[in-house]
Image (cartoon, rainbow, N blue to C red):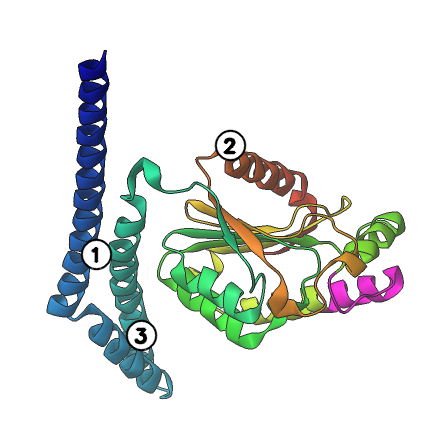
Amino acid sequence: MTWLDHLNTFFGIVGFVITVVTLVKVQSVHRAQAEERTLLRRLYGTDSLARHLRSAATFLRQGNENDARALAEELVRLCGQIEGISRALDSMNRTRGGTGRQELQLVDKGYYTPAFLSRAVNDAQYKVDFLIYRNLQFTNVDLLESMELAAKRGVHIRILGLSSAAEESVLEQASLVLPWPQAPAQTLRRQLAESEERIKSIVAGWSEQARLRFEYRGYTVVPNVHFVRMDGLVRQGFIGTLSPAQPARLEDRGYVELPIRSEPGATLSRHFDQLWVRSAATTVSGG
């Protein structure tokens, strides 16, 4: 029996070595793919070209001539296409990670901060959906300008926020789960209404091309889920947690990132789509 033990040990060592060599080769291929895409971006100069085009567009938009402004809009569109190609090259390295890549990613901080929202809008290639409680952050001029530029390059943007027309009982329940700053139902209704009007007035000044790809609706049910859906990803933070249970600082709020093809991502997507249909009667802008 001794020689059988030695033989089993030998084959076990051989199997372990083969596994290690395979893992090393896989990691080497992934590194080579990443380096290849970085080299392609440098060879084509996409990053530098996009910056120069955006600078030129900004300069042309300062003038009053229609031709100059039309050229600026065309440059913005081309810039968006170039940036979309760059993002696609970057995402290829993530999506080709194989079955070893985790479906769920945990991010400790930064949920629904201004930088989080801007990144979602700027990184979107064809659509971005926001499901929110209160709409104060979406009255930010810089964020709305980013949305306008994204819409011009072909991104469809939808926002679902708690409606100012919701019943008093709904707003009372909402006030229990609002992140800082907290507000009673009466104050919350005023905040929602004022923000809805501001968003509506700013979007009304967009080009027709951008307005056609933007829509904001208010929902009238008690809020629970809160997330952003961008292309094939869902980023979701706290779900109906009481206000005192949430991190005190906005930037300390964490979130999970999961693909829509996963069952949790698909469930959240169905929730958004069904709530979107239910909220057609309370459309604020677009549609």
Residue at image position (18%, 65%) is 41
Q: Residue at x 20, y 68 (%)?
A: 46
Q: Position of residue 92 (x, y in %)?
A: 26, 49
Q: Which residues are magenta?
A: 179-194
- Hey, what amino acid is under mark 2? Glu
Amino acid beneath label 1 = Ala
Q: Where residue 270 appears, x then y in whole percent?
A: 56, 35
In terms of image quadrants, where is residue 159? bottom right
- Label located before the other in sequence (3 or 2): 3
Residue 140 lies, with reference to residue 188, above or below; the image says: below
Residue 160 relative to residue 42: left or right = right
Q: How crowded is the residue under tag 1: few (<14 C-alpha within 10 Å), some, or many (20+)?
A: some
In this rendering, position of residue 18 left or right of residue 136: left
Of the numbered discs in the image, which one, if any, rests on residue 263?
Answer: 2
Q: Main secondary structure of the magenta part?
A: helix
Is 203 in front, or is 6? 6
On whether residue 128 falls in the magenta region, the answer is no
At x 27% / y 72%, what residue is drawn? 75
Residue 184: say if magenta: yes
Q: Amino acid at mark 3?
A: Ala
Q: Residue furthest front?
A: 2
Q: What residue is pinned by disc 1?
A: 34
Q: Secondary structure at mark 2?
A: helix
Q: Quarter of the image holding residue 122? A: bottom left
Residue that carries the numbered disc 3 in the rendered image:
70
